[in-house]
Amino acid sequence: MSAFVAAVIGLLGGIYFHKTALDRKEEGAVAKAEKLLKDAADKAEQSRKELMAEARDEIHRLRQEVDKETKERRNELQRAERKLEQKEENLDRKIENAAKLEEELKLKLEEVKHRIDALSEREGDLVKRLEEIAQLSREEAKNVLLAEVEEEANHIIGLRLKEMEEKAKRDADRKAQEIIAVAIQRCSVDFTSEIAVSVVHIPSDEMKGRIIGREGRNIRTFETLTGVDLIVDDTPEAVTVSCFDPIRREVARLSLERLIQDGRIHPARIEEIIEKAQRDVDTQVLEAGEEALLETGIKHIHPELAKLIGQLRFRASYGQNALHHSLEVAHLCGLFASELGLDESIAKRAGLLHDIGKAVDHKVEGPHAVIGADIAKRYNESTEIINAIASHHEDEEPQTLYALLVAAADAASASRPGARRESLDAYIKRLEKLEEIAKSFEGVNKAYAIQAGREVRVAVSPETTDDGCMQKLAYDIARKIEAEMKYPGQIRVTLIRETRVVDYAK
């Protein structure tokens, strides 16, 4: 029991001593905290005082800066006010000067008006005196003066126009020569000369008897079906086919070659071979037309026109192949158009079709240019193409530049050395004969054969020949040419007096 009591007392003592120690620590901590708070408060007060001092210094500095800036602004405003006052004074002075100047101008204007009125009166008096002296009114004098000035101006203008026209002609001739020369240099077209006969080679002279046949029945059948003359003479290993129509001549030549190659020569076989040859030539005609269109780049053309173009392959004019001539003219027209800045396709089309009438001129009456124009019109060609075809031999007036290009290209192609072939002596004699026939009529002063003998122009005397007998004279000359001369195609007879009358020897 005593031990327990002693333990309780010990425990209570320990608790007391421990509490006492804690109280002392707590009092020390409180004292320390109070000291820290006091130190912090002192420091805060000291910082506040320092900040307040700095703020007062900054406020004082800023106030001084504001006062300085305000003073400068005030000085600037004062200077600006002084400048404005000076400008107002200057403006007032200018306004006063302007007012004075306006008054002076008004006075001068009134003075000028008075002078003008006085001069007008003086002018009227002078005009009246001049009219009395000249015995002309003012309007009459003005008209006389205007007439003189107009006459002088017209004279000067006429001289100037003549000078410009001559210069334009010189320049135009030079430019035209340059264009033609360049075009001809750039154009390279093959051409061949055509003749009226074709020679067919045979393997031996024994074949001539088989061609003639018993009692000549084979050759008669052949000539009847083809419309050609088959000449079997002493020429070794050759037979000649003669015909003015080149298509019929080509059919005959092709048929004869096939008959010789086949060896079976009798009337039935001849008829069969000729029919096949005719179909082959028709095919060649179409192919030739298509090749020509392809070569010139022409599109959208009527099939019948393409066929007629192909037929030109078997036509000739003075020995010049008509298709080759048309191709050359087409290329030249295209080159001319490119040099002049025109449409090359239209020019080439007109050039290729310009001699289309020659494909049928042996079947239709009239000049091939007019025939070709009618054909082109029938197949809905443009007016430019139709006029170019019709006017390339002056049968109509050219209405477009393309017509002139076609005429120039046609002349260049036909007149090129070697393009057309004819015996020189026969050619000269035929031209001289044309002129001689025309000059043999009364009233004819001069006669000239032109266009390679395709036209004769006759200048008649106006004193001995009147307009009434012109047509009769042209008819008589044409009929005499028909009676006394032989020539290919037709010859145009043109009489010139004050009017021109045209007839044709057909």
Image: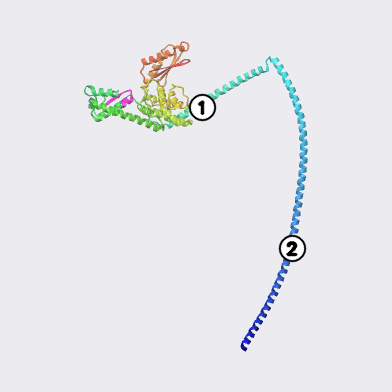
Task: Return the disc, 1 or 2, that comes first in the chain's sequence.
Answer: 2
Residue 232 visible in image: no
Tell me the quarter of the picture where residue 7 sits: bottom right
Q: Residue furthest left?
A: 214
Residue beneath disc 2:
52
Q: Give me the residue at 51% from left, 27% from top.
A: 171
Q: Give me the residue at 37% from left, 31% from top.
A: 290
Considering depth in this image, is 502 or 26 the residue closer to the camera? 26
Residue 499 appears at what percent x and percent y? 47, 16
Q: For mark 1, does the 10 Å Cα neighbourhood hold few (<14), some (14 to 19), or many (20 or more) residues?
A: few
- Answer with left or right where residue 486 lies relative to residue 218: right
How was the colour assigned to the protein in this rendering?
rainbow
Residue 380 appears at what percent x and percent y? 42, 27
Q: Quadrant of the N terminus?
A: bottom right
Residue 144 appears at what percent x and percent y? 64, 17
Say which amino acid is labelled 2: Met
Considering depth in this image, is 114 or 480 the residue closer to the camera? 114
- The numbered dot on residue 228 is none
Q: Which residues are magenta?
A: 237-250
- The numbered dot on residue 171 is 1
SS of the residue under disc 1: helix
